[in-house]
């Protein structure tokens, strides 16, 4: 008798890069995690994960001083909240470049909302006086979008609804099929 598993092609699972704090790792600036059970318990059964944390990669440590996005003219930099004269943009950009290289084979990206590094749509942006100007994407997200147009990127808030999960997974599987064809 022929074992079906011997004749069916074995398809690799899609690869998704995920913010480490969403996977339950205590890597946030305050030493906390933000685990999302659907990602950890359900999605993990269908996809391979590549954990990423731009601020850890940058060597900022845990715990670490809080950072924020600061706009001056058209330029956005990353500074310490308590010492806005300390510019962390260069170190964080270098870390993001390394992570981008490390997730070249990923088919999607799940990031932590509102983070200056990982936020997708709702990271607060401040002026030099610390006044909120609006919201935007975190540095890592902006660099991913610039480097990989069409790459599926989502935050955990969108995955809180079934419609958001389905929409993201369709994008991921399409991207995965194109990448491997
Ligand atoms: S939001 Fe991003 S940078 Fe912040 S702890 Fe989570 S993975 Fe690290």
Image (cartoon, rainbow, N blue to C red):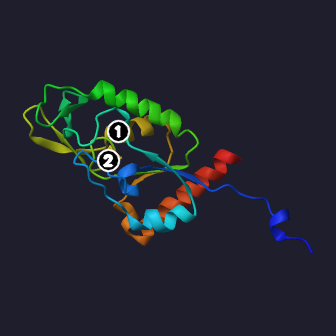
Q: As drawn, is 14 to the left or to the right of 144? A: right
Within 10 Å of the Cα at label 2, are there few (<14), some (14-19), or many (20+) other Cα atoms?
A: many
Q: From the viewer's perspective, tell me whether residue 180 is left or right of residue 159.
A: right
Nearer-the-camera pick, 169 or 92? 92
Q: Position of residue 57 (x, y in %)?
A: 38, 35
For label 2, being within 8 Å of ligand 1 is answered yes
First in sequence, mark 2 or 1: give its number. Answer: 2
Q: Residues within 10 Å of mark 1 (few under 14, many from 20)?
A: some
Residue furthest right in the image: 1
Q: Secondary structure at mark 1?
A: helix
Give the residue at x 83% y 70%.
4
Disc 2 marks which residue? 27
Residue 2: which quarter of the image?
bottom right
Residue 49 percent location from the top left of the image? 52, 52
Give x and y (percent) for residue 42.
50, 68
- Tell me the quadrant of the picture where the N terminus can be found: bottom right
Left or right: 90 with respect to 50? left
Q: Could you tell me which residue is drawn at 38 percent across and 27 percent down?
A: 94
Residue at 33% over, 32% down: 59
Q: Does label 1 point to a residue whose CB lies under 8 Å from ligand 1?
A: yes
In the displayed structure, would residue 77 be above or below residue 123?
above
Outermost bottom residue: 1
Q: Which residue is mark 1?
A: 56
Task: Count all numbered tags in the image, as a single digit.
Answer: 2
For the residues labelled 2 and 1, say whether their Cβ atoms are less than 8 Å apart: yes
What residue lies at 56% left-to-right and 65% top-to-bottom? 45
Which of 79 and 164 lies nearest the eye of the viewer? 79
Q: Position of residue 90 (x, y in %)?
A: 31, 24
Give the secondary structure at mark 2: loop
């Amino acid at each position: 008798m022929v074992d079906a598993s011997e004749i069916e092609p074995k398809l690799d699972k899609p690869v998704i890069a995920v913010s480490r704090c969403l996977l339950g790792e205590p890597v946030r600036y305050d030493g906390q995690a933000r685990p999302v059970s659907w990602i950890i318990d359900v999605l993990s059964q269908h996809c391979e994960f590549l954990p990423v944390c731009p601020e850890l990669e940058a060597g900022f440590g845990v715990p670490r001083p809080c950072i924020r996005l600061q706009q001056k003219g058209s330029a956005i930099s990353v500074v310490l909240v308590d010492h806005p004269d300390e510019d962390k943009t260069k170190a964080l950009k270098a870390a993001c470049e390394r992570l981008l290289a490390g997730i070249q084979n990923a088919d999607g990206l799940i990031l932590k909302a509102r983070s200056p590094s990982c936020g997708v749509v709702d990271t607060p942006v401040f002026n030099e006086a610390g006044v909120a100007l609006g919201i935007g994407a975190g540095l890592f997200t902006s660099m991913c979008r610039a480097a990989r147009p069409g790459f599926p990127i989502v935050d955990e808030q969108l995955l809180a609804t079934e419609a958001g999960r389905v929409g993201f997974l369709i994008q991921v599987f399409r991207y995965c099929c194109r990448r491997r064809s």
